[in-house]
Image: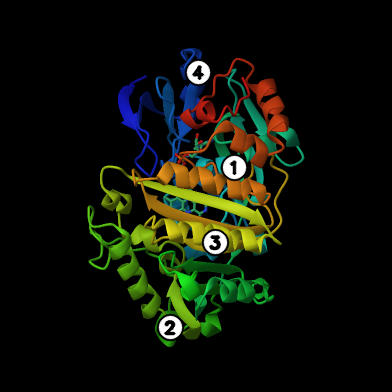
Amino acid sequence: MAVTRTSLTGWGRTNPSAAELVELFRSELPAALKEVDDRGALVRGLGRSYGDAAQNGGGLVIRLMGSATDALLDREAGTVTVSAGASLDELLRYIVPRGFFVPVTPGTRFVTIGGAIASDIHGKNHHFDGSFGKHVLRMSLQLADGSVAEIGPDRDPELFWATIGGMGLTGIVLDATIRLLRVETSRMAVDTHRLPDLDTLMDTMADGDDDAHRYSVAWIDLAAKGSQLGRSVLTRGDHARFDQLPAKHQSDPLAYGPDQLVSVPPIIPRPGLLNHVTVAAFNELWFRKAPKRKIGGIESISSFFHPLDMVGQWARFYGKPGLVQYQLVVPFGQEDAMRRIVERVSASGAASFLAVLKRFGAGNEAPLSFPQPGWTLALDMPGGAPGLGKLLHGLDDMVLEAGGRNYFAKDAHTVPETIRRGYPRLAEWQAVRRRVDPHGVWQSDLGRRLHLAGD
Ligand SMILES: Cc1cc2nc3c(=O)[nH]c(=O)nc-3n(C[C@H](O)[C@H](O)[C@H](O)COP(=O)(O)OP(=O)(O)OC[C@H]3O[C@@H](n4cnc5c(N)ncnc54)[C@H](O)[C@@H]3O)c2cc1C
């Protein structure tokens, strides 16, 4: 096999490590696994996790070949069977014109099916539809001993749920069958509200109206302080029905062709100019630009779900130190804790113009799945900012105290104790991993940093 020694990072471009990178078809995996040494092997998707989840310094990193061109769409059942190496981007191009949508999409469509399962990703519809794993009906999993297991909620459920959210450390998902959502159009009907502060935002999101919308998320101005703390723009939407489309879109209601701009829009501060002053100015502009209240605006799938994908390699404008993303969840009833967290970030001046708040609904059976009922906040900060480590560890303490946890797919800083306390079912997951991988073939930088395997 043709391996290349390559320095890899996550999307945040922090913590690089060098590994032997190889692209393999599924049929080549058993032979490759025989060659793995004690630094182990890991599968990598499109590297959209922010930290070190898709890295295995000193070991083997496998990019699983696969595309959506051989996906099998069962129109009657509303399901698709697709290679785990295929991206949501490819899958959407195939299914949207045929009247289907993925059950869950993150804020980028450049993730693989395998990565979506391994992180048990959530979208703006978690309060409505749960996370990705809930919609996986079956999958085949390449095990460390070279065999392939066929698993599902009724077939070795322990291994199935340990693989959902299992960060690639139980095996390589080869393909999966996923329940899709039927859509009449490729457009979204969107309501937008501008809200003056955090309390008004949380009250508005909790008033029951959120539950009437499939999708809901709020952008928060984390540079605002005092009475404006947490001022925000709340967007809530649903897939538009045919009769909601303007006449110009009715001739081809399922047309889908997401665009990508070639450069960073001038509204966004340039590398080196990213500081609390420019971020505050950007946020001011962003807040004012949003309509105070707009009901039923029609938007494309890409502008509603994947606006950042419009800007190719946008993480690069954070420059050499990269960016750190932090996502936390605290249970309902811990609104005061969320307010204190927002105050702490705002007071720290840690520049962040990509801060979002949303509500999570019920979690699922996966021991390492991140979502739990409550409030989730995700924010970006420039890596290397003075005092950043102290701030993040301080936030960890506040989150744990409130009964919450943080998200592996975004993490680049936390420590094993925080994970042990935030994920009380970790030992259960470790027992399944020991059963299917007793010699520790699957390894990652994240797994070693957080002692996930427990050895
Ligand atoms: C702009 C942006 C927005 C985002 N928004 C969200 C969001 O709204 N919600 C959310 O939940 N996440 C979000 N994310 C995070 C992203 O969805 C996850 O990190 C996802 O796992 C990335 O998929 P990937 O294919 O790039 O996987 P990678 O980042 O390459 O890998 C992630 C993990 O998946 C494992 N993995 C990959 N392929 C397989 C496989 N075939 N079998 C088993 N394990 C595998 C890897 O080993 C690794 O542990 C966002 C990321 C970005 C950059």
Up-down relation of residue 321 to residue 245 (above or below): above
Q: Where does label 1 land, which residue?
A: 176
Counting residues from the start of the chain, the first of labels 1 and 3 encountered is 3
Residue 117, quarter of picture: top right
Q: Picture coordinates of residue 392 (x, y %)? A: 48, 46
Amino acid, disc 1? Ala
Q: Which residue is drawn at 26% across and 47% down?
A: 319
Quarter holding the C terminus is top right
Other residues around mark 4 within 10 Å, as few (<14) / some (14–19) / many (≥20): some
Q: Dots 1 and 4: beta carbons under 8 Å?
A: no
Nearer the N terminus, badge 2 or badge 1?
Answer: 1
CA separation, marks 3 and 2?
28 Å
Per the model, the C-alpha gap separating discs 1 and 4 is 21 Å
The residue closer to the viewer here, 231 or 359, is: 231
Q: In which quarter of the image is residue 274?
A: bottom left
**Model colouring:** rainbow
Q: Which mark, by number, is residue 256?
A: none
Query: Which numbered dot is residue 291?
Result: 2
Relative depth, front residue between 41 and 282: 282
Q: Earlier in the sequence, mark 4 or mark 2?
A: 4
Q: Mark 4 points at which residue?
A: 33
Where does the N terminus fall, quadrant-wise?
Answer: top left
> Residues under labels 2 and 1: Cα distance?
41 Å
**Label 2 SS:** loop
Q: Label 3 near label 1: C-beta < 8 Å?
A: no
Answer with mark 3 or mark 4, whichever residue precedes in sequence: 4
Q: Which residue is under mark 3? A: 101
| Residue drawn at x 67%, y 50% as measured from the top left | 134
